[in-house]
Image (cartoon, rainbow, N blue to C red):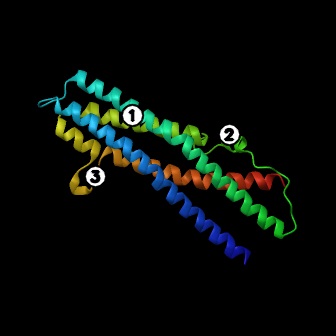
């Protein structure tokens, strides 16, 4: 029975991770739409090639929009991750209680916040890196492509491929993967913190 509950619990966590990734992507999509809109304005002002001054202005605007996106995303995402951690601790505490073990530890979000997540970074630092990587990738695409229509296609993607072949789509997949990994990390880290209190 306990093993079945643990399996169901793990499956439930994967559903939570997928649901949270969808929620995050919906927010990111709104900002990505702004990026394409602003880039289209700059491209529309050009003839055959985008002037350097327009290109630099576009990069600055896109950087600002990208920063706004993650400034909104990370605090709300963290609240969702804290809820995941609390749920994990509650589930593990209940299992331990059924075995006659009563953990005395109180869940500490600050301790969880300091835990290393990926490449030696905390969750917050990992999403800051993703923000910076996305901007660098977009800037590289913009600098490399001076032809307006081709630039929009490379950033937004092509309709023939359902816009899945553009720079924004690639960054989108990376963010979704990071969110799902963050959910699993949070559950594992909170569980390990609880076990450590039993040693």
Please name the residue that numbered disc 1 is placed on. Answer: 65
> Which residue is found at the position 73% from the left and 74% from the top?
2
Label 2 or label 1, whichever lies nearer to me, is 1
* Vertical relation: 100 (above or below) 171: below
Q: Secondary structure at mark 3?
A: loop
> Is residue 129 among what the camera can see?
no
The front one of 187 and 86 is 86
For the residues bearing labels 3 and 1, Cβ distance under 8 angstroms: no
Q: Position of residue 116 (x, y in %)?
A: 64, 43
Q: Earlier in the sequence, mark 3 or mark 1?
A: 1
Reply above or below: 9 against 132: below
Dot 2 or dot 1: first in sequence order is: 1
Residue 114's disc number: 2
Identify the residue shown where x is 62% and y is 52%: 185
Left or right, 148 with reference to 131: left
In the rendered structure, which disc, 2 or 3, sits on the residue that comes first in sequence? 2
Which residue is outermost to the bottom? Answer: 1
Q: Residue placed at 23% from the left, 50% from the top? A: 158
Q: Which residue is mark 3?
A: 163
Picture quadrant where residue 6 is located: bottom right
> Which residue sits furthest top?
53
User: What residue is drawn where x is 37% and y is 37%?
Assistant: 137
As helix, strand or loop, the secondary structure at mark 2 comes to loop
- Pinpoint residue 80: horizontal percent, then vertical percent: 59, 50
Label 1, residues with CA under 10 Å away: few <14, some 14-19, many ≥20? some
């Amino acid at each position: 029975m306990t093993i079945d509950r643990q399996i169901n619990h793990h499956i439930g966590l994967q559903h939570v991770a997928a649901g949270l990734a969808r929620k995050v992507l919906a927010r990111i999509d709104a900002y990505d739409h702004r990026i394409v809109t602003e880039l289209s304005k700059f491209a529309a002002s050009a003839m055959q090639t985008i002037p350097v001054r327009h290109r630099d202005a576009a990069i600055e605007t896109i950087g600002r929009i990208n920063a706004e996106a993650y400034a909104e995303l990370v605090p709300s995402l963290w609240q969702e991750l804290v809820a995941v951690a609390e749920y994990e601790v509650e589930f593990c505490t209940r299992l331990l209680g059924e075995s006659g073990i009563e953990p005395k530890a109180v869940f500490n979000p600050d301790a969880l916040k300091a835990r290393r997540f990926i490449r030696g970074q905390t969750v917050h630092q990992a999403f800051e890196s993703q923000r910076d990587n996305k901007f660098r990738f977009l800037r590289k695409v913009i600098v490399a492509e001076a032809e307006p229509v081709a630039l929009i296609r490379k950033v937004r993607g092509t309709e023939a491929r359902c816009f899945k072949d553009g720079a924004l789509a690639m960054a989108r997949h990376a963010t979704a993967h990071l969110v799902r990994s963050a959910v699993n990390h949070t559950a594992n880290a909170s569980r390990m913190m609880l076990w450590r209190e039993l040693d």
